[in-house]
Amino acid sequence: MWKSVLAGILIAAFAIAAFLAIGCATFFGPAICAIDRKKQAFTPTVQSPARHDLYMREGAPEPYRDKQNPMEKTIGNIVEGARLYDLRCAVCHGLMGVGDGQGGASLAVQPADLGRSLGQPLYKDDFFYWSISEGGAPFGTDMPPFKNDLTDRDVWRILTFMRASFAEQGGPVADDAAAPP
Ligand code: HEC
Protein backbone atom coordinates (compact mmCIF):
# COMPACT_ATOMS: atom_id res chain seq x y z
CA MET A 1 0.00 0.00 0.00
CA TRP A 2 2.64 2.57 1.07
CA LYS A 3 4.60 1.60 -2.02
CA SER A 4 1.91 2.85 -4.33
CA VAL A 5 1.58 6.05 -2.29
CA LEU A 6 5.32 6.54 -2.58
CA ALA A 7 5.18 5.81 -6.30
CA GLY A 8 2.38 8.36 -6.63
CA ILE A 9 4.44 11.00 -4.83
CA LEU A 10 7.46 10.23 -6.99
CA ILE A 11 5.44 10.52 -10.18
CA ALA A 12 3.95 13.80 -9.01
CA ALA A 13 7.39 15.16 -8.09
CA PHE A 14 8.72 14.05 -11.45
CA ALA A 15 5.86 15.73 -13.26
CA ILE A 16 6.46 18.99 -11.37
CA ALA A 17 10.20 18.81 -12.02
CA ALA A 18 9.59 18.13 -15.71
CA PHE A 19 7.13 21.01 -15.82
CA LEU A 20 9.67 23.38 -14.29
CA ALA A 21 12.47 22.11 -16.51
CA ILE A 22 10.68 22.02 -19.84
CA GLY A 23 8.64 25.06 -19.10
CA CYS A 24 5.12 26.22 -18.99
CA ALA A 25 4.97 27.04 -22.67
CA THR A 26 5.51 23.44 -23.75
CA PHE A 27 2.43 22.33 -21.83
CA PHE A 28 0.07 25.25 -22.14
CA GLY A 29 1.39 27.15 -25.14
CA PRO A 30 3.20 30.49 -25.16
CA ALA A 31 0.05 32.59 -25.10
CA ILE A 32 -0.82 31.57 -21.55
CA CYS A 33 2.70 31.44 -20.19
CA ALA A 34 4.02 34.61 -21.74
CA ILE A 35 1.77 36.60 -19.41
CA ASP A 36 3.33 34.87 -16.41
CA ARG A 37 6.85 35.51 -17.52
CA LYS A 38 6.17 39.17 -18.17
CA LYS A 39 5.04 39.65 -14.60
CA GLN A 40 8.04 37.87 -13.10
CA ALA A 41 10.87 39.46 -15.01
CA PHE A 42 11.44 43.16 -14.43
CA THR A 43 11.07 44.80 -17.79
CA PRO A 44 12.11 48.43 -17.49
CA THR A 45 9.80 49.66 -20.24
CA VAL A 46 11.76 47.68 -22.80
CA GLN A 47 10.07 49.75 -25.50
CA SER A 48 13.46 51.15 -26.30
CA PRO A 49 16.09 48.71 -25.03
CA ALA A 50 18.76 50.84 -26.73
CA ARG A 51 17.99 53.78 -24.42
CA HIS A 52 18.31 51.57 -21.36
CA ASP A 53 21.42 49.78 -22.62
CA LEU A 54 23.19 53.06 -23.24
CA TYR A 55 22.20 54.46 -19.83
CA MET A 56 23.31 51.32 -18.01
CA ARG A 57 26.63 51.24 -19.87
CA GLU A 58 27.60 54.91 -19.90
CA GLY A 59 25.03 56.87 -17.91
CA ALA A 60 23.25 59.86 -19.39
CA PRO A 61 25.19 61.79 -22.05
CA GLU A 62 26.46 65.32 -21.42
CA PRO A 63 25.11 67.88 -20.59
CA TYR A 64 22.54 65.81 -18.72
CA ARG A 65 24.85 63.49 -16.83
CA ASP A 66 24.37 63.38 -13.05
CA LYS A 67 21.98 66.33 -13.04
CA GLN A 68 19.53 66.25 -10.17
CA ASN A 69 16.05 67.65 -9.96
CA PRO A 70 16.39 71.14 -8.42
CA MET A 71 12.62 71.59 -8.03
CA GLU A 72 11.18 71.05 -4.60
CA LYS A 73 8.37 68.59 -4.13
CA THR A 74 5.81 71.30 -3.40
CA ILE A 75 2.14 71.10 -4.29
CA GLY A 76 2.64 74.04 -6.67
CA ASN A 77 5.38 72.25 -8.63
CA ILE A 78 3.46 68.98 -8.69
CA VAL A 79 0.28 70.64 -9.92
CA GLU A 80 2.14 72.59 -12.61
CA GLY A 81 3.97 69.40 -13.61
CA ALA A 82 0.65 67.59 -13.85
CA ARG A 83 -0.78 70.33 -16.05
CA LEU A 84 2.19 70.16 -18.41
CA TYR A 85 2.15 66.38 -18.42
CA ASP A 86 -1.54 66.29 -19.34
CA LEU A 87 -0.90 68.81 -22.09
CA ARG A 88 2.27 67.36 -23.63
CA CYS A 89 2.74 63.75 -22.58
CA ALA A 90 -0.57 62.06 -21.77
CA VAL A 91 -1.52 61.84 -25.45
CA CYS A 92 1.09 59.09 -25.83
CA HIS A 93 1.96 57.90 -22.31
CA GLY A 94 -1.62 57.94 -21.02
CA LEU A 95 -3.11 59.80 -18.06
CA MET A 96 -1.57 57.36 -15.60
CA GLY A 97 1.75 57.06 -17.41
CA VAL A 98 1.37 53.41 -18.35
CA GLY A 99 1.85 54.07 -22.06
CA ASP A 100 -1.75 53.66 -23.18
CA GLY A 101 -2.39 57.09 -24.72
CA GLN A 102 -4.35 57.23 -27.98
CA GLY A 103 -1.51 58.98 -29.81
CA GLY A 104 0.89 56.15 -29.14
CA ALA A 105 -1.27 53.29 -30.31
CA SER A 106 -0.03 53.24 -33.88
CA LEU A 107 3.64 54.02 -33.25
CA ALA A 108 6.22 51.42 -34.29
CA VAL A 109 7.87 51.66 -30.86
CA GLN A 110 5.16 52.00 -28.23
CA PRO A 111 5.33 54.75 -25.58
CA ALA A 112 7.04 53.66 -22.39
CA ASP A 113 5.27 52.69 -19.18
CA LEU A 114 6.85 55.47 -17.15
CA GLY A 115 6.13 53.96 -13.73
CA ARG A 116 8.56 51.12 -14.34
CA SER A 117 11.67 53.22 -14.70
CA LEU A 118 10.46 55.75 -12.13
CA GLY A 119 10.22 52.96 -9.58
CA GLN A 120 13.76 51.73 -10.27
CA PRO A 121 16.46 53.34 -8.12
CA LEU A 122 19.01 52.67 -10.88
CA TYR A 123 17.24 55.20 -13.08
CA LYS A 124 18.24 58.52 -11.64
CA ASP A 125 16.92 62.00 -12.37
CA ASP A 126 19.36 62.41 -15.25
CA PHE A 127 17.80 59.47 -17.14
CA PHE A 128 14.47 61.30 -17.31
CA TYR A 129 15.95 64.76 -17.87
CA TRP A 130 17.95 63.40 -20.81
CA SER A 131 15.13 61.25 -22.26
CA ILE A 132 12.60 64.08 -22.13
CA SER A 133 15.00 66.74 -23.44
CA GLU A 134 16.49 64.77 -26.33
CA GLY A 135 13.60 62.47 -27.18
CA GLY A 136 13.96 59.29 -29.20
CA ALA A 137 15.85 60.53 -32.27
CA PRO A 138 19.11 58.79 -31.25
CA PHE A 139 17.16 55.52 -31.06
CA GLY A 140 14.83 56.00 -34.02
CA THR A 141 11.66 56.27 -31.90
CA ASP A 142 8.84 58.82 -31.93
CA MET A 143 9.46 60.16 -28.43
CA PRO A 144 9.67 63.91 -29.21
CA PRO A 145 12.56 66.08 -27.94
CA PHE A 146 11.29 68.77 -25.58
CA LYS A 147 14.47 70.79 -25.03
CA ASN A 148 13.38 73.60 -27.35
CA ASP A 149 9.78 73.43 -26.29
CA LEU A 150 9.85 73.36 -22.52
CA THR A 151 12.18 75.17 -20.15
CA ASP A 152 14.49 73.08 -17.96
CA ARG A 153 12.42 74.05 -14.97
CA ASP A 154 9.29 72.73 -16.67
CA VAL A 155 10.94 69.43 -17.55
CA TRP A 156 11.94 69.11 -13.89
CA ARG A 157 8.42 70.00 -12.76
CA ILE A 158 7.04 67.23 -14.97
CA LEU A 159 9.50 64.82 -13.36
CA THR A 160 8.46 66.04 -9.90
CA PHE A 161 4.87 65.24 -10.81
CA MET A 162 5.72 61.87 -12.36
CA ARG A 163 7.74 60.80 -9.33
CA ALA A 164 4.89 61.79 -7.03
CA SER A 165 2.25 60.00 -9.09
CA PHE A 166 3.63 57.17 -11.21
CA ALA A 167 6.63 55.74 -9.38
CA GLU A 168 6.48 52.05 -8.53
CA GLN A 169 3.26 51.70 -10.33
CA GLY A 170 4.58 49.60 -13.18
CA GLY A 171 2.21 46.67 -12.79
CA PRO A 172 -1.21 46.27 -14.35
CA VAL A 173 -3.63 49.02 -13.45
CA ALA A 174 -7.30 48.77 -12.66
CA ASP A 175 -9.57 49.28 -15.66
CA ASP A 176 -10.90 52.55 -14.37
CA ALA A 177 -7.45 53.97 -13.55
CA ALA A 178 -6.93 55.16 -17.12
CA ALA A 179 -10.39 56.69 -17.42
CA PRO A 180 -10.55 60.48 -17.52
CA PRO A 181 -11.26 62.02 -14.12
C1 HEC B 1 4.32 61.18 -29.77
C2 HEC B 1 4.21 60.37 -28.59
C3 HEC B 1 4.96 60.78 -27.35
C4 HEC B 1 4.83 61.95 -26.62
C5 HEC B 1 3.92 63.14 -26.92
C6 HEC B 1 5.71 61.80 -25.48
N1 HEC B 1 6.36 60.60 -25.51
FE1 HEC B 1 7.71 59.90 -24.16
N2 HEC B 1 8.01 58.25 -25.28
C7 HEC B 1 7.35 57.95 -26.44
C8 HEC B 1 7.84 56.69 -26.97
C9 HEC B 1 7.37 56.02 -28.25
C10 HEC B 1 8.82 56.23 -26.06
C11 HEC B 1 9.60 54.90 -26.11
C12 HEC B 1 10.80 55.01 -27.00
C13 HEC B 1 11.93 55.78 -26.40
O1 HEC B 1 12.29 55.55 -25.23
O2 HEC B 1 12.51 56.62 -27.12
C14 HEC B 1 8.92 57.25 -25.01
C15 HEC B 1 9.81 57.19 -23.96
C16 HEC B 1 9.84 58.09 -22.91
C17 HEC B 1 10.73 58.03 -21.78
C18 HEC B 1 11.77 56.96 -21.54
C19 HEC B 1 11.17 56.04 -20.51
C20 HEC B 1 11.78 54.70 -20.40
O3 HEC B 1 11.71 54.17 -19.32
O4 HEC B 1 12.27 54.16 -21.39
C21 HEC B 1 10.40 59.07 -20.96
C22 HEC B 1 11.03 59.41 -19.61
C23 HEC B 1 9.35 59.81 -21.59
N3 HEC B 1 9.03 59.21 -22.79
C24 HEC B 1 8.74 60.92 -21.05
C25 HEC B 1 7.86 61.73 -21.75
C26 HEC B 1 7.37 62.99 -21.24
C27 HEC B 1 7.65 63.55 -19.86
C28 HEC B 1 6.59 63.53 -22.22
C29 HEC B 1 5.90 64.89 -22.21
C30 HEC B 1 6.72 66.05 -21.91
C31 HEC B 1 6.57 62.58 -23.33
N4 HEC B 1 7.35 61.51 -23.00
C32 HEC B 1 5.86 62.77 -24.49
C33 HEC B 1 6.37 58.71 -27.05
C34 HEC B 1 5.94 59.95 -26.64
Image: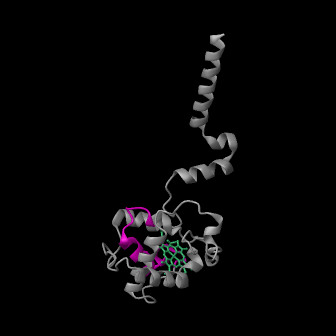
Q: Is residue 147 left or right of residue 13?
A: left
Relative placement, left or right, of 175 versus 44 is right
Give the residue displayed 64% in from the left and 16% down from the top: 5
Q: Which range is magenta?
A: 118-143
Quadrant location of the N terminus?
A: top right
**Looking at the image, residue 79 lies above or below residue 41:** below
Taking the magenta stretch, the answer to whether it contains residue 132 is yes
Residue in view at x 64 percent, y 77 percent = 102
Q: Nearer the viewer, residue 113 or 131?
A: 113
Q: Position of residue 90 (x, y in %)?
A: 56, 78
**Residue at 46% in and 73% down:** 162
The total of numbered circles placed on residues is 0
Q: How is the image coloured?
A: one colour
Q: Residue furthest front?
A: 75
**Residue 133 in the image, given as x and y percentages of width and height:** 42, 81
Give percent across and percent down for residue 83: 50, 84
The image shows residue 38, relative to residue 81, as above or below, that is above
For residue 71, above or below residue 46: below
Q: As drawn, is 119 to the left or to the right of 172?
A: left
Is 144 magenta? The answer is no
Quarter of the image where the C terminus is located: bottom right
Residue 128, percent across and down? 41, 73
Q: 46 above or below 158?
A: above
